[in-house]
Amino acid sequence: MVISDENNSNLIKPANFEGGIEMDNRKFGLEIGHNRRALGAINQNLVEGRPYPCVVHKRGLSEKHEIYEKKQADPGHRPITRRFAAQIAGLQQSQAEEIKKSKPSISNSNDFGECIFIDDEHKLLADQPVPMSLEKSEAVNSEPDQMEEIEMEDIVEEPIVDIDSCDANNPLAVVDYVEDLYAYYRKMESFSCVSPAYMDQQFDINERMRAILIDWLIEVHDKFDLMHETLFLTVNLIDRFLEKQKVVRKKLQLVGLVAMLLACKYEEVSVPVVGDLILISDKAYTRKEVLEMEKLMLNTLQFNMSVPTPYVFMRRFVKAAQADKKLELLAFFLIELSLVEYEMLKFPPSLLAAVAVYTAYCTIYGLRQWSKTCEWHTNYSEDQLLECSSLMVDLHQKAGTGKLTGVYRKYCSSKFCYTAKCEAARFLLESQR
């Protein structure tokens, strides 16, 4: 290292530091050595005996290599963690700033006593390249984050199918208003429901008689080849009327006939005449009795015939399930079995329809499946369907036994593709136990 004197043209070359340069009766090199030892001592007091981070002691290449091999062989030696490295870097930076502030500047070349020689190797630790062990630890720590991001990208959520796109050009499908219509149906279905304990107020009829009546009306409905809407509205009118009006046993069949007559007038294009209904009842009632019961029923129900029945929701939910003909027939078979049972009145119409579609799917494919599209359009999750589904499976198992087999015989015909002979989904019962 060479320092030039502006006043003198001669160059002053410092001698070996071991001997030092005599200047003002003192050895400059020895003073520098004394200063280095003092810094090392201060460093040991501050940082628990570790080397001062801003000073690098000179070592030979072989000596450095031996120290590095000892650290690598030491099992207790661990790479610096990120947090600890950040704290160390902050400490080094603050110490470096203090050194820069306390470092004297060479303002006058004659004042050699104020000069401090610093070797090129004396660099800040922050300016040196990061050790390989630290780089490796940071790379390892970043790998789980990358793997987690890749795994999250691989997860694809099941899309919700647009079930109305195929009917965009069909004006009868009213695609623009269909969601608003079903939102209104869900809001109004509570007004079409009856109390599941309304039979307690009847003194002469019971739930068993109701089941016999509806089972018989299902056969009548099939014989007249009426629409599905007519059957569901007929059952709804019977229950709503019996909830508000006490009926004797011998008039119960008349209530059923008049309810079907009103449903036909509301839904059908061609309505059966009163005489045909009298013949179906084996002339148990006269024409006058039929007309009087019709007026009584309409007044009791306040002429409210526009109510959402399970059939309204069935059409929508079957479409959401993208069901074929077999699945659709099985779903209607299951829900007609539910119409006969009095205990199924505790479930709202939309839930019955959703459960019928869900149970039919499980029966055909042999596994539990409820798609996001079905959940979206029905507003029911799979867990909400399980209780009613187990009851529906039990009805399916008993459909061909006992005296009330009208639904079973109807769906055992070729007209309905022998749907009733399909095996029940018993695994749904086992999952509930």
Image: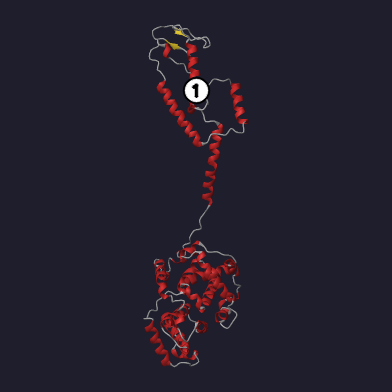
Label 1: which residue? 55
Tell me if I can see residue 410 in this picture: yes
Along the line of sight, the residue nearer the viewer: 76 or 207: 76
Q: Residue 351, image x and y in percent?
A: 48, 70
Q: Residue 201, image x and y in percent?
A: 44, 82
Q: Residue 195, image x and y in percent?
A: 44, 76
Viewed as shown, does residue 189 lie left or right of 218? left
Classify mark 1: residues with Cα within 10 Å, few (<14), some (14-19) or many (20+): some
Q: Check the image and name the residue furthest to the front.
A: 45
Q: Residue 209, image x and y in percent?
A: 51, 84
Count numbered badges in the picture: 1
Above or below: residue 403 compared with residue 328: below
Viewed as shown, does residue 307 lie left or right of 85? left
Seen at 49% across and 15% down, the residue is 34
Above or below: residue 153 compared with residue 433: above
Three-letter code, disc 1: Val
Along the line of sight, the residue nearer the viewer: 118 or 178: 118
Q: Quadrant of the C terminus?
A: bottom right
Seen at 38% across and 81% down, the residue is 301
Q: Check the image and name the residue furthest to the right.
A: 73
Along the line of sight, the residue nearer the viewer: 194 or 128: 194
Tell me if I can see residue 269 in this picture: no
Along the line of sight, the residue nearer the viewer: 340 or 307: 340
Numbered disc 1: secondary structure: loop
Seen at 38% across and 7% down, the residue is 7
